């Protein structure tokens, strides 16, 4: 019997009517004779609301308590979905992340899955149950509850699919696939029928939240095809897999945008060995992830060091970096929290000149100032003012003729 893992996101589970709709879709798979494991997100904006509530209670709610609190969102949706299926006459059982054997490290708020001990899931499948697992959460060796980072239910789903040897992991959401740009922003965006893990990983890591980056990483590692499709329609989705044609398309495949960018510049840093380490080591110890790092060529052994962090981590990062900057004799530390990034992505850009020039030209035509640039072999990213990100995506979609489709 074929085993599938299906995942339904927050918008698909937003209210009782939608939960019943999801239950009907799961029932269809069961009726086809498939064994079904389902992973759910919290209903609608529940996670945001719980975070808001925590901060109304305390300025520093603490990550451990927050994780227990946030995990309740997925417990609510998983139990309601199991009830909906049972009301329709199907055998179904809900399991928390811990019960489903999702074992993580102890990095609260963005824990990594270390292993999946899916014994209980297998047992319930053998009993004929549809198994509904609360996404986004796991448990440490100390039996503490963790969460996997925002959007992490996708990762629960792919990890379970890998551990159970599922044929495919189906991610059902409010759009019917992966598009050439966020379809809510660019109505002309085109749906891609397939995309490789590598391109999808860059897209997801650079802001296209349609699939969580860790989920794509695990999909690639365990060779699990991931289908992204709509929970509201039956239209065919986008298949993320490893067998995408290697023919080098002379094309940008997709554009990603991200409004969660803040920048710190340490000005007038003495240019000697050990300086970068002395700045970045304490940030790493504090669990602050750094994205882009740019160091200017030094003049008279003095340089500027710029790096970016998520907006929510700016204050913490500044508190750490300011005293270090002083102690190493840097002139000052300045920050800007109103930035965003726009990226063009496509394996077709590899070894093909001209993409960067076209991108910069398109942005300059819009009067958009580029503050930082980073690249990988298949991506070019520009960090710009957050207020211009939408204009940038529109202009790039047009310039790279992406409305024409595959
Ligand atoms: P869910 O709640 O189902 O997990 P998310 O909100 O996390 O859904 O992800 C789906 C959203 O991702 C879409 O509503 C869309 O606005 C956004 N998105 C961003 N970039 C893309 C893209 N390239 N293709 C499709 N959707 C995208
Ligand atoms: N509910 C969590 C979030 O909003 C996890 C998820 O939706 O995947 O981030
Ligand atoms: Mg999501």
Image (spheres, grey):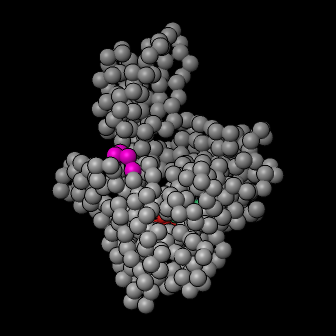
Q: Is residue 337 left or right of residue 355?
A: left
Q: Quadrant of residue 236?
A: bottom right
Say which residue appears at 60% left-offset and 42% top-offset.
Answer: 381
Residue 200 pos. (x, y %): 62, 54
Q: Is residue 98 left or right of residue 404?
A: left
Q: Quadrant of residue 372?
A: top right
Say which residue appears at 58% left-offset and 41% top-offset.
Answer: 382
Residue 297 pos. (x, y %): 56, 18
Q: Quadrant of residue 229?
A: bottom right
Q: Nearer the viewer, residue 343 or 185?
A: 343
Say which residue appears at 45% left-offset and 36% top-offset.
Answer: 290
> What are the residue bounds of the magenta stretch?
104-108
Residue 224 pos. (x, y %): 61, 59
Q: Nearer the viewer, residue 45 or 212?
A: 212
Q: Is residue 138 above or below residue 287?
A: below
State the quadrant of the C terminus: bottom right
* Residue 259 visible in the shown view: yes
Q: Nearer the viewer, residue 185 or 168?
A: 168
Q: Is residue 373 left or right of residue 401?
A: left
Say which residue appears at 52% left-offset and 59% top-offset.
Answer: 163
């Amino acid at each position: 019997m074929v085993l599938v893992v299906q995942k339904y996101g927050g918008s698909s589970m937003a209210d009782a009517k939608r939960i019943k709709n999801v239950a009907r879709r799961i029932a269809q798979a069961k009726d086809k004779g498939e064994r079904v494991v389902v992973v759910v997100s919290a209903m609608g904006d529940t996670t945001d609301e719980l975070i808001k509530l925590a901060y109304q209670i305390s300025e520093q709610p603490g990550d451990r308590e927050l994780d227990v609190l946030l995990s309740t969102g997925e417990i609510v949706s998983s139990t309601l979905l199991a009830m909906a299926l049972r009301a329709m006459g199907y055998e179904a059982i809900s399991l928390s992340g811990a019960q489903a054997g999702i074992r993580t490290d102890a990095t609260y708020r963005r824990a990594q899955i270390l292993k999946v001990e899916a014994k209980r899931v297998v047992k319930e499948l053998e009993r004929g149950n549809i198994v509904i697992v609360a996404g986004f959460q796991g448990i440490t060796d100390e039996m503490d509850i963790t969460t996997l980072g925002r959007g992490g239910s996708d990762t629960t789903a792919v990890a379970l699919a890998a551990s159970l040897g599922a044929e495919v992991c189906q991610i059902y959401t409010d759009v019917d696939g992966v598009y050439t740009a966020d379809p809510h922003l660019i109505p002309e965006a085109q749906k891609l029928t397939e995309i490789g893990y590598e391109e999808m990983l860059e897209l997801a890591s650079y802001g296209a939240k349609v699939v969580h980056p860790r989920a794509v990483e695990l999909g690639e590692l365990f060779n699990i095809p991931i289908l992204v499709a709509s929970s509201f329609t039956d239209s065919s989705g986008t298949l993320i897999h490893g067998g995408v044609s290697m023919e080098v398309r002379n094309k940008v495949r997709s554009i990603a945008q991200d409004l969660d960018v803040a920048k710190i510049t340490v000005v007038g840093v003495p240019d000697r060995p050990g300086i970068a380490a002395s700045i970045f080591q304490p940030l790493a110890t504090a669990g602050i992830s750094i994205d882009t790092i740019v160091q200017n060529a030094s003049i008279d052994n003095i340089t500027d060091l710029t790096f970016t962090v998520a907006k929510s981590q700016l204050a913490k990062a500044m508190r750490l970096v300011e005293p270090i900057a002083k102690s190493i004799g840097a002139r000052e530390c300045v920050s800007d929290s109103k930035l965003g990034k726009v990226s063009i992505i496509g394996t077709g850009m590899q070894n093909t000149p001209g993409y960067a020039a076209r991108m910069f030209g398109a942005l300059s035509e819009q009067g958009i100032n580029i503050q930082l640039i980073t690249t990988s072999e298949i991506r070019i990213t520009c960090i710009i003012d957050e207020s211009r990100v939408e204009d940038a995506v529109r202009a790039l979609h047009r310039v790279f003729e992406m409305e024409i489709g595959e």
